[in-house]
Image (tube, rainbow, N blue to C red):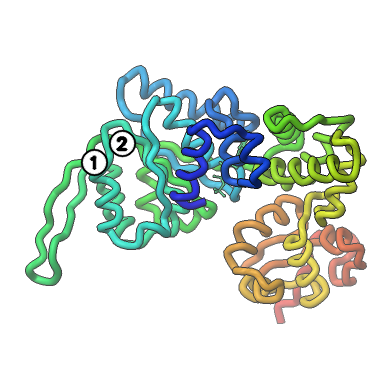
Amino acid sequence: MDESQLDAAESAYVAGRSLTTAEAEGDERVVEAALRPRTLAEVIGQERVREQLALLLEAARRRERVPDHVLLSGPPGLGKTTLAMIIAAEMSSPLRLTSGPAITHAGDLAAILSGLNEGDVLFVDEIHRMSRPAEEMLYMAMEDFRVDVIIGKGPGATAIPLEIPPFTLVGATTRAGLLPGPLRDRFGFTAHLEFYEPADLEQIVRRSSDLLEVELGSDGAGEISRRSRGTPRIANRLLRRVRDYAQVRADGVVTRDIARRALDLFEVDESGLDRLDRGVLDVLCRRFGGGPVGVSTLAVAVGEERETVEEVAEPFLVRLGLLARTPRGRVATRAAWEHLGLAAPAAYGPDTLLFEPDHD
Ligand SMILES: Nc1ncnc2c1ncn2[C@@H]1O[C@H](COP(=O)(O)OP(=O)(O)OP(=O)(O)O)[C@@H](O)[C@H]1O
């Protein structure tokens, strides 16, 4: 989500538009914003990260200092933006939002930094996609709360030092591995968000159902949470689609049976795999005999961007043990073949999980 989208969602919410109005108008962003937990205590799951953050914030409050910079990593939809908003709220500080791709020049970053006030929380989403010169400027800002703004070009260029009031940077990334070491090292606290357990997702679905005034029947929340790819954003989205189905095709109550029928209609399978996930496995097994195959080739074959395959589909397939990353490319596991209802090639052997390609 980019800055303007978030701003729009948040301000519409703060302006007091009711959730039901936003829902009726089909405004996904406002609905998503309204479903966000607002305090650490409201956050469901991610216990360790929550406790670590609570400690960091409490210590900063006691010392009357701004909290250390925080890096949040993990697949999309697990709550990075939500946590950034909570950090600001818990510190009673304003939150400034931007994203890596929006910072193309060091000057863009200098403009943002020079507008900060003491204690502000600056959230940079997709921080791994910031330009190199901006990244280097950020190192200095994070460490010394000052930057050198370069005016002019070539031999006549001059550096003008600019003091920045102490602030907390919250960086979010789906690819912590892509961050240069010097940037990673300047965060005082790094949290990796894991996929959620079904029990936590079920609580999230129950909480959202209350807010959306959806009536849950027997195990309706359980069925949705089991098929939500361990991701709160997906759980909330599926809940709304199942709610639609329940209202149009039944009596409005979300039971397990209704959830199953709705999710089958929306092509979400029993393990939570969607069309893209199954497409990746299908291409890997049927077209490339189980791999190994490069991720770019896979992406072309399923007609998606490489980043989407790498950042959205793969982490979940790896987590389910359906796909493995090897130095030679992506490989389908035996479970992947079984998931597609196909017989794994004999090369997998009776006990081997992975297809071991011949190196000759
Ligand atoms: N721990 C949680 N408890 C309840 N709801 C959550 C939790 N984490 C996330 N959500 C819900 O999931 C939605 C997505 O969360 P969020 O936007 O923070 O994810 P994200 O990791 O920042 O994703 P992206 O990187 O794609 O922007 C939010 O609307 C929020 O309602």
Quadrant position of ligand 1: top right
**In the foreground, 68 or 10:** 10
355 w.r.t. 61: above or below: below
Label 2 sits on residue: 167
Counting from the top left corner in percent of width and height, residue 314 is at: 67, 59
Residue 291 appears left or right of 129? right
Given contact means CB atoms under 8 Å apart, are the residues at marks 2 and 1 in contact? yes
> Which residue does the numbered mark 1 point to in the structure image?
145
Q: Position of residue 295 (x, y in %)?
A: 63, 70
Provide the secondary structure element on which disc 2 rests: loop
What residue is drawn where x is 82% and y is 57%?
A: 267
Question: What is the spatial separation of the Cα atoms under label 2 and label 1, in whole angstroms?
Answer: 8 Å
Disc assigned to residue 114: none
The kind of secondary structure element at disc 1 is loop
The image quarter containing residue 327 is: bottom right
Q: Point out residue 203 in the picture as x, y percentages from the top left corner.
A: 72, 29
Residue 359 is situated, as x and y percent measured from the top left of the image, at 71, 77
For badge 1, the amino acid type reads: Phe
Identify the residue at image location x=14%, y=61%.
151
